[in-house]
Image (cartoon, coloured by chain):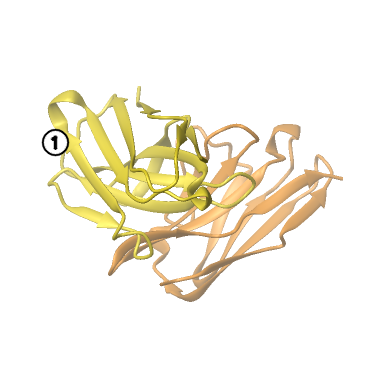
Amino acid sequence: EIVLTQSPGTLSLSPGERATLSCRASQSVSSSYLAWYQQKPGQAPRLLIYGASSRATGIPDRFSGSGSGTDFTLTISRLEPEDFAVYYCQQYGSSPKMYTFGQGTKLEIK
Amino acid sequence: QVTLRESGPALVKPTQTLTLTCTFSGFSLSTSGMCVSWIRQPPGKALEWLARIDWDDDKYYSTSLKTRLTISKDTSKNQVVLTMTNMDPVDTATYYCARTNNWNIDYWGQGTLVTVSS
């Protein structure tokens, strides 16, 4: 089973700054099967990025995803107040068919 | 517009079986590539995927929980049911159902909090 490790655990930044969130897999992951979610308190997760770099419907272009193999990155170019939340990476394994999530990165206002 | 809603008991006793229903609209589980997944989240903790059922009735389960889980669908009612046996306090969590488009989990329900306590 693939394990996803996100870093840092908590990231303290100010609005307008750039955020870089990391997701490292214990073994190689197909880029097609790597996604990122945003979760705000009391809400369900929201899909941000799928296929490692494709933005989901309605996601602002300040969110971008990159990476391949075992190292993936979510970048938020200029933080808006509504971006402070917890972010999860997730991978889908085709054999066996199952999903794993990282432990999350909390993005908090500095 | 895709929507999903979870329903079921808010409180179950240890050793009981939990039955959750996901009622959805805006897509059909008879469409090729469409699936529904269940994911849970203990309070203050990370997300954990539980199970998935596909348009062709293929079913997939978390390896650590597969002996306790059963997923099924009623396409005519636009519903997916998840049962989890032998509930324990560590199973206390918010349970989400979500549309899965091929392999992408794209739309989520609001979640339902299930507490396991005697």
- Depth check: give the residue in front, A82 or B24: B24
- Extreme-front residue of the structure: B118
| Residue located 26% across and 37% down the image | B81
Residue A39 sits in which quadrant?
top right
| Residue located 29% across and 60% down the image | B67
Label 1 resides on the chain identified as B
- Extreme-bottom residue of the structure: A27
Q: Residues within 10 Å of mark 1 (few under 14, many from 20)?
A: some
Give x and y (percent) for residue B73.
Answer: 19, 37
Q: Is mark 1 on a helix, strand or loop?
A: loop
Q: Name the quadrant of the N terminus of chain A.
A: bottom left
Give x and y (percent) for residue A40.
Answer: 63, 36
The shade of chain B is yellow
Left or right of residue B39, residue A4 in this image: right
Q: Say above or below: A110 vs B23.
A: below
- Depth check: give the residue in front, B44 or A6: B44
- Depth check: give the residue in front, B43 or B115: B115
The shade of chain A is orange
Give x and y (percent) for residue B111.
Answer: 47, 33
Residue A54 in view, yes or no: no
| Residue located 73% across and 52% down the image | A19
Q: Name the quadrant of the C terminus of chain A.
A: top right
Residue B74 in view, yes or no: yes
| Residue located 29% across and 41% down the image | B82
The kind of residue tagged 1 is Ser
Q: Say above or below: B32 vs B3.
A: below
Q: Name the residue under label 1.
A: B30
